Amino acid sequence: MAKHNKNSSDSITDVEFMGWEKTLAGTRMALFTITAVEHPFRGATVSEPTLRSLDLEVPQTPIHESNTNEFRSSITNGK
């Protein structure tokens, strides 16, 4: 049976949020590392679509500050 890591809220997780990467299109993409001990891709850093294709739960992801600023500017500018 696979061992699981626990996050700060003591819930079981097989994945850790690692950070953000800027894409060629200029958007941000969340990156995650697979931490499940017996998973064949343990230690791999992957995107959210890859997690979903591997049938792994996507952990809560913090909002990137630039995304928040873009959202605020679109409200202010009426877009």
Image: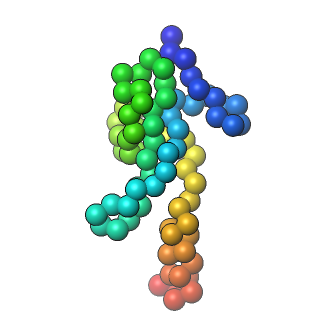
Task: Name the spot of residue 50 as percent of width and height, x first.
Answer: 35, 40
Q: Quadrant of residue 39?
A: top left
Residue 5 is left or right of residue 42, and the answer is: right
Seen at 48% across and 20% down, the residue is 37
Query: In the rendered image of this protein, does residue 71 appear above or below residue 36?
Result: below
Q: Residue furthest left?
A: 24
Task: Name the spot of residue 77 as percent of width and height, x first.
Answer: 51, 89
Task: Name the spot of residue 74 as percent of width and height, x first.
Answer: 50, 81
Q: Residue furthest top?
A: 1
Seen at 51% across and 69% down, the residue is 66
Is residue 19 shown to the viewer in this render?
yes
Query: In the rendered image of this protein, does residue 73 appear above or below residue 6?
Result: below
Task: Name the spot of residue 7 as percent of width and height, x first.
Answer: 64, 34
Query: In the rendered image of this protein, does residue 42 appear above or below residue 74?
Result: above
* Count of numbered circles in the view: 0
Is residue 52 shown to the viewer in this render?
no
Seen at 51% across and 10% down, the residue is 1
**Coloration of the structure image:** rainbow
Q: Which residue lies furthest to the right in this view?
A: 9
